[in-house]
Amino acid sequence: MIISTMMADQPPPLEATTLLNDVPLVPHMVNGDSTQQVIVVQVNPGETFTIRTEDGHIQCIPGPAHVPMMSPNGSMPPIFVPPGYVSQVVEENGVRKVLVLPHSTEFHPSLHPPPPHVTHFMHHHPALLPHPPHHVFSQVASTGELPPQFIHQHPPPPPHIFQEQEPRSHGRMNFPPRDERSMKIKRLKERQISSHNNSKLHSPPSSPHKAHIATNSHMQNGYSKGQHLTGGPIKLKQAIRTRSSPPAENDSTDGEAEPKKLQDLNPIMSKPVVSSLEARSALLSWSVQIASENRESPTTLVQRRFVYDVTVSNNGKNGKFKPAYSVSATCLPLEGSISELVSFTTESCEPDSPAPPKLLTRTRNCLNLQWKASNDNGSKINGFLLEWDEGKQGPFKECYFGHLKQYKLTKLLPSTRYAFRIAAKNDIGMSGFSETVVVYTAGSVPPAPLPPRLRQAGITWLCLEWSQPSEMTSDETLTYILEMEEEGSGYGFKPRQNSEDLICTLKNLRRNTSFKFRVSDTLTVQTAIVPPGPCHPPRLASKAKPKELSLQWEPPSLDGGSAITAYTVEMSKTEQEDRGAVYQGPDLECTVGNLLPGQTYCFWVKAANKAGNGPFSEAAAFSTAPGPPERCKVPLLICKSASCVLASWEVPGCNGSEITEYRLEWGRMEGCMQVLYTGSSSSYDIKGLTPATTYYCRVQAGNIAGIGLFGDTAVITTPPSIPAAVVDLQVVDEELLETPLPSSSECLALQWTEPCCNGSDIIGYTIEYGEKQQISVENVTSCILTNLIPDRTYRIRIQAINLLGSGPYSSYIKAKTKPPPPNPPHLECVVFSHQSLKLKWGDGSSKALATETSLYNLQMEDKLSRFYTIYNGPCHTYKVQRLNESTTYNFRIQAYNESGDGSFSEVFSFATTKSLPPALKAPRIQQIDSNSCEVSWEPLQPMRGDAIVYILQLTNGKEVDQVYKGTDTLYSFTNFQTNCEYRFRVCAARQYQDTNGLQELCGPYSPSTTFSSQRQELDLPCANTASDAMKIKKKPLSDEQFAFLLLLVFALVAFLFAIIIQYFVIK
């Protein structure tokens, strides 16, 4: 037995003990006097605690139990023990414990010596002696299930000690100083020896502890998988002896010296080692080292086995640790340190056996089964195996395997028994099969039985009977369903009996009520009726509304033997006023409307049946919810100015809740008003209005219940005023004008939109520009400012004027006049030819072109002395082509920019030169004899009256000689050398007369013709053909042919480079 004491401001929760309903407590204990001390007596299983109550009676309290007591002076009560036992007081974590121990009890490291100030307040009485203890272990089934606070999770103490299970803290206990503890242990042992000498002849019977060691160890080692093990504290206790035998003298001497030796022992746990990891098990091994501070070997002090506590947590280091292993053995009373944490993960395995499949639906020929997945044990389930006995009650066979959790079997026999079982499969293997479930398919419908008969009848009961259908055989078992319908209930037939009996007695029926019964045909019976009893007071069916209340009520507990046919609800404002009916009907709820918001009303309800009306219920009072305010009246509108109106309104009825806000809608159209003001004030100044405009206004009020209706609409028209400001004054581009400006560099075109006249027509405008210069115009929307300075920026604004005055000026706009048009450039001809003239003007450098803003218009005079444009653009050069030779042409040029077109320049005249004669074809050579030949060429027509002369040249190697010049087209060449090659070419020359005399223009030379003097037969066709072939072969390549050949060579080289890169670099 353990008695724990604690000082507390309040006693412990009384409901935590099992005997609080049976054990009387003193008043100051229940009141929680802070000066009292709570004594908790722990009665272990198999023990009985006897106590005297305040009235003098003796009460026996069997264990297990916690008995709270109260010490009035804060002292420890005396504990009287039977012969052979001693009491030992220890203090741990602020809690003092009194242990009732045998005279040879061993010292436990978690127990400290008793405090020296313990006094006694309980008097000795024989009835307070505890009964002899009996050993009870929490794992033994015969002791029954114990509350969690009494389950012993650590190695069992000696047979005479049962201690509380307290939360175990990691780390070592805080022991008192060794010298002080030694003195206390010595005094304790002296008391034990003296008690031992007096009670040696009265030792308790022998303990059955040894008989339970094997069972206890087996039960404590049976824990499920998934727990992570960690080391627990070590406890050492002396070996147990038979309690019936008296201790020897040497044992008493050793027992006195042994606690002193235990002070020098320090057990140290090593970190557990995990091995042999499997899916559901793991092997833990550890070692312990005993260190001693004296010279004696620890093995001489610890000759017996240790007690190890192993706890596990599957939620990490901060999780809850649960005991997983404990060895019941006794040895020296020492407690060692806790080992380091070790973590491990078990292996995956096959799934757990799933639950049996469940029947979803069934028919005569099909069954639809469904099942749930079991624990996959670390490997995802990838299939289910469903087996059945095929309705033959024989061996099971597979009927489905897959990942679905539902399967439908078809083509089954009706009214047939089928057995099923299910197993789950993952990558590790197949689980065990579930329990077998048996289901039946639906069968054939039996024939209808004979109609029921009334056997006996009472006021509130009826007895019916019926017969079995004639078509059924005697060996078939049928179940009969008797259904009953109560008259006026509206619920139809309801089953009242479902059994194999052919008789049924129905009790607790209503009086004088007609009932219909059927097994097949319907039987109608009736009991006597009376008026119904009082109804319960009505209650609100839903949240109260401002103008209606929804009520509902329960039917009376006594309906008088007849169905309730109608209910009547009456209402009044108070219980003293006259009441009026607001509802009559069969429903159990109604809605009372046309009520006032925020008012209280009283209601009564009564029920009626065929016998008459029952009494009214008690009154029930309900209040309607506050409603939105009443509709506002027409607001009062007062014009303060042409742009400001004061709106005010009266406060409407609030309907039970104070008005919190008003909403003012304002607009120019009655159907398109918008909320302009929201607030609690009953007036508002509306500003920024347009003069001479009609406005509409209405107001609504709101409170916590909602927003009321809008009042009637008020109408007001503001008075006229000066015009509004012009908002879109702008400068118009000259391109958009129908009439060009007189001078774009000295004029600006303005345009604007007429502003609002504010009730009075606009009569004119005032335009201000430059240095406060003003100009007045009539009622127009455009104006041209003239006589301005070119290339200058002006700030311009405008205001409108009506009969009431001048309106505000518009915002300033900035406009800049264009610069003056550019002067025409000087024109000159830089290149002359017989068909073209290249003209140039101005500075044509690239820098000048980059900053040039002017464009040029170049014109040429035609045959009718009219100038037409031949070029228009920013360039400074232009080539006039397709001209006639030796002709004079007249030109002029004009410069212009964004400022406008400049003036034309003076007329410039340029003449083309005479054209050269065209090139002649290669001359023809005909050998006349061995010393002479004739050279001829095609003639040219005179060019514009100029004579044509021909020049014939002879090329011999690098020497070129002119052999002929004249007007003839035939020349005879004689006295040439044999075995020589001669080449002839010819050109035409144009002769004309000018102021400098006779001039001559030579055209290009013709291709050369080769003549060999060694050939004799020049007139043979074959010879001529060979000569022509040689000429063609020696003809040089033209520029186009040479370019094509060069391009072909480049293409071939690029293709070769591409092949080289493809095969030798990339690959």
Image (cartoon, grey):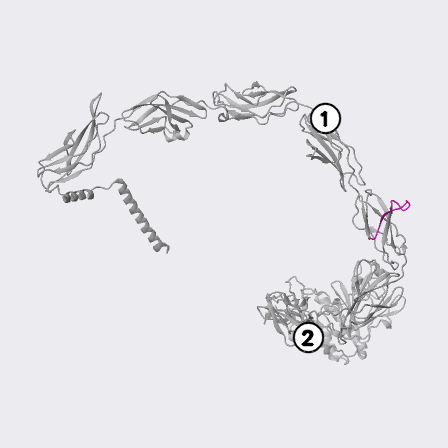
Point out the image quarter for the C terminus: bottom left
Residue wearing tag 1:
639
x, y (%) of residue 650? 78, 33
Name the mark on residue 218. 2
Point out the image quarter for the N terminus: bottom right
The mark total stands at: 2
- Specify whether residue 424 is painted magenta: no
Residues packed near mark 1 inside 10 Å, few (<14), some (14 to 19) or many (20 plus): some
Q: Amino acid type of disc 2? A: His
- Secondary structure of residue under mark 1: strand
- Secondary structure of residue under mark 2: helix
- Specify whether residue 585 is painted magenta: yes
Q: Answer above or below: position of 523 versus 101.
A: above
Q: Answer above or below: position of 977 versus 408.
A: above
Q: Nearer the viewer, residue 394 or 643?
A: 394
* Contact (Cβ within 8 Å) of mark 1 with mark 2: no
Q: Give the foreground label among 1 and 2.
A: 1
Name the mark on residue 451. none
Look at the image and give the residue range highlighted in magenta.
571-586
Q: Answer above or below: position of 630 versus 893.
A: below
**Residue 720: quadrant of the picture:** top right
x, y (%) of residue 570? 87, 48
**Residue 773: quadrant of the picture:** top right
Earlier-in-chain disc, 1 versus 2: 2
- 459 sits to left or right of 398: right
Q: Nearer the viewer, residue 577 or 246?
A: 577
Q: Amino acid type of disc 1? A: Cys
x, y (%) of residue 310? 66, 69
Residues packed near mark 2 inside 10 Å, few (<14), some (14 to 19) or many (20 plus): some
Work out which residue is located at the far front of the displayed protein and give it: 471
x, y (%) of residue 82? 82, 74
- 654 sits to left or right of 223: right
